[in-house]
Amino acid sequence: MQKKKGIDGTRLRDTYDRVTGIFNEIFDVRLLTVALFALIGYCALFTQRKFPLRWMIFILFGMILQVFVTLTARTGDRRPVHFHKGMVFLWFALHIMMVISGLFYQDWLPESVPLLLCYPVIFSVFASRDDTETFRAILRGAFFAVLPFVVISYIRVPVNIGYPGYRGIFYDANPFAMCCIVMATSGFLLAYAFFKEQRKKSCIFYLAGGLLASVTLVLTLSRSGLLAFAGVCVILTGAIVAGTAKKPGRWIALLCILLALAVAGGGFMTMHKIREAYEEDYALAVYNHETYGNPILVPKPEERSLSMDDLTSDRWGIWTTILENLTWNGHETSVVQEWVAKDGAGDRLFNAHNAFLGVTYNNGVIAGVLLVAYTLMAFIRALGYYWRNRTESAFAATPLAFCTVFILVGLFESVYAPFSIIGCTYLLVQAPLWRIRE
């Protein structure tokens, strides 16, 4: 008798079926795209309105939408599912640690509970489905969830080109950029899939949508967004070329050239934003001097020397402060109070601006190490999943794409939350990475 590998995820799915009972018969599987549209659209709405991600009512309604997703995802397929032990261990160890942190600082409980309980159920249900149709539903839901925000932004807010960047109907350009990354990545993946299926009209539609989101992303001037999108384009395209092209060397060389151009463009944009910030600081100091008699303490723009804080918009100082103030069980608030005190400006209440350091600061150093380990394992398994399925499914690169998006955006923004738009979309594509290859 062959020994079973991994952890039996079928039991989790069967338990969920028994709990939901008759409701499984009410929902049609064709509603899955609608359910995912609602869930990701809800994340986009709260990204746009800047409601706190730990707000209890927001978390509760998001969990209800997750239940709706799993109900509409049921297909009646009884294929046994076994989970990878490493993925399961890291997931539950990470989120149990987040719950423990919540016992000390209750603000973290609303985030950790849905991560600990709800997403594994989604993984169990999704893992028993056909990956192609599941990915198609996720990508369509994400694409159409963001599209209205982009269109309404262009209708209601005139486009401004240049510093500080176009933010549309959003409170800030960076959250708008995050939504555009999700839409653009989804659009290009769908366009590639429909191209492979020779469905020209659908391919053109999603390609146009991806280009619209890409142009909007450039207009935001979000450096973290542009870096993440350039990275996912290079890694995704490189993986597809390496796996399918007859002469991949030429294509990879072209990608390297495009990457060099993207880096040069990013460097130019960074220096432009720094120069604008220098000029604004000096102009404000002059104004305060002429109006209130305050001394001018800010050097002239041409006299200032470049620092890591300038290059990272103060992120470097926040990150080093976090590393100097680590605890095993986290901190009461996501605002890095030690940096606020060091900076001397009480109104600059910044969080970690880094998903990995954010979890480390909020929930403790053990949780931070576990998140890094889980993320690395997920990325490695996403690469393996793509390579095994690259000739069978046009959607095989979906987990790799969103793992890359999460990592690159997460280096500069705190996006690891159950219903942040980057975090949610990243988590929805995890199911095949949990599943052991049969």
Image: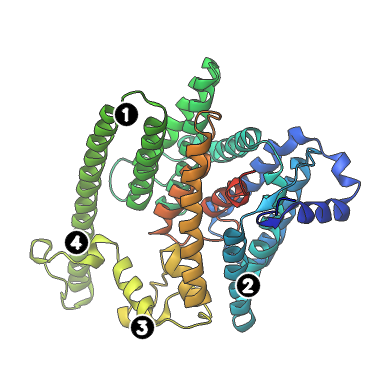
Mark 1 touches mark 3? (CB < 8 Å)? no
Query: Callout 1: helix, strand or loop?
Result: helix
Residue type at mark 3 is Ala
Closer-to-camera residue (423/156): 423
State the mark number for residue 278. 4
When asked about the image quadrant of residue 133, the answer is top right
Residue type at mark 2 is Ile
Query: Callout 4: helix, strand or loop?
Result: helix
Decide if residue 412 is in sight here. Answer: no
Mark 4 touches mark 3? (CB < 8 Å)? no
For the residues carrying marks 1 and 4, which lies nearer the camera in this image? 1
- Against 384, residue 154 (above or below) is above
The residue at which mark 2 appears reads as: 96
Residue type at mark 4 is Tyr
Q: Is residue 214 left or right of residue 63?
A: left
When asked about the image quadrant of residue 211, the answer is top left
Mark 2 touches mark 3? (CB < 8 Å)? no
Closer-to-camera residue (365/435): 435
- Against 50, residue 395 (above or below) is above
Please state the horizontal and vertical placement of residue 38, each as a whole percent of the image. 67, 44
The residue at which mark 1 appears reads as: 248
Closer-to-camera residue (126/268): 126
Query: Callout 3: helix, strand or loop?
Result: helix
For the residues carrying marks 2 and 4, which lies nearer the camera in this image? 2
The residue at which mark 3 appears reads as: 341
Q: Is residue 410 left or right of residue 291?
A: right
For the residues carrying marks 2 and 3, which lies nearer the camera in this image? 2
Q: Who's the residue at 64% across and 72% down the image?
A: 109
> Between disc 4 and disc 3, whose residue precedes?
4
